[in-house]
Image (cartoon, helix red, strand yellow):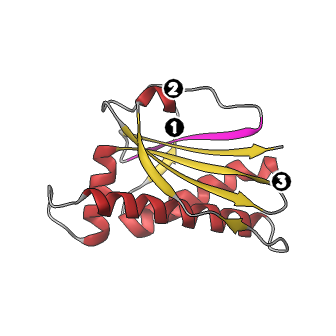
């Protein structure tokens, strides 16, 4: 299943970003830090089933603003912190639930409640563990998005 995760996660995340937020999302072709703000949102959700672990989604604050504006059809500067957190939590839930359903429809997966907090951009740049799949993506050509699926033994 591990070899199937990367292309399935990229396809799924790209479709969700395009349909929900009208934002193109593509794999990052060049290795350059795209997290320029002093803090980044980190959404996280745990999963249990055939395997257990957690999915983490890192988004720059500016991108979260744009996503909420597009989804709720709000004017620039009218988003609330709670809307951004709710949106990231729901996005984690949708990516994780759909990802494992697409990979193995015969296994029941339990998901924990998602939660979102701020982290410094250095956390995004950490090297993934050998039990992880890390996917660097770009939204709108300039906003870095990182998806990490970490498995626990």
Any mark on residue 107, and which?
Answer: none
Percent of width and height locating residue 21? 37, 64
Question: Are dots 1 and 2 in contact, CB under 8 Å?
Answer: yes
Q: Quadrant of residue 150?
A: top right
Left or right of residue 145, residue 11 in this image: right
First-in-chain label (1 vs 3): 3
Query: Is residue 133 left or right of 139 when viewed as pictured?
Result: right
Q: Nearer the viewer, residue 125 or 23?
A: 125
Q: Which residue is mark 1?
A: 28
* Residue 149 screen position, x and y as percent: 66, 47
Q: Identify the residue at horizontal 15%, vertical 61% (top origin).
A: 78
Horizontal relation, residue 13 to residue 50: left or right:
left
Label 3 crowd bin: few (<14), some (14–19), many (20+), radius 10 Å: few
Please state the horizontal and vertical placement of residue 52, each as a whole percent of the image: 77, 54
Secondary structure under badge 2? loop
Query: Badge 1: few (under 14), some or many (20 or more) residues near its Cα, within 10 Å?
Result: some
* Helix, strand or loop under label 1: loop
Residue placed most toward the observer, 97 or 116: 116
> Could you give the CA–CA distance between mark 1 and mark 3, rounded to whole angstroms?
23 Å
Question: Measured along the vertical axis of the image, is residue 108 above or below residue 61?
Answer: below
Residue holding disc 2: 31
Q: CA distance from mark 1 to mark 2?
A: 7 Å
Q: Position of residue 113 (x, y in %)?
A: 56, 64
| Residue corresponding to mark 3 | 1
Range of the magenta residues? 131-139
Q: Secondary structure at mark 3?
A: loop
Q: Give the crowd class for mark 2: few <14, some 14-19, many >=20 residues within 10 Å.
A: few
């Amino acid at each position: 299943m591990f070899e199937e995760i990367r292309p399935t996660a990229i396809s799924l995340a790209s479709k969700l970003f395009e349909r929900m937020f009208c934002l193109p999302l593509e794999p990052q072709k060049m290795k350059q830090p795209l997290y320029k703000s002093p803090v980044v949102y980190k959404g996280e959700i745990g999963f249990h089933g055939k395997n257990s672990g957690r999915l983490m989604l890192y988004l720059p604050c500016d991108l979260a603003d744009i996503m909420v504006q597009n989804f709720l059809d709000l004017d620039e500067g009218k988003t609330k912190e709670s809307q951004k957190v709710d949106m990231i939590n729901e996005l984690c839930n949708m990516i994780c639930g759909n990802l494992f359903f697409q990979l193995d429809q015969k296994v029941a997966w339990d998901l924990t409640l998602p939660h979102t907090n701020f982290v410094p951009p250095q956390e995004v740049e950490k090297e993934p563990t050998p039990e992880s799949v890390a996917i660097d993506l770009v939204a709108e050509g300039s906003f870095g998005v990182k998806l990490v699926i970490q498995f626990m033994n």
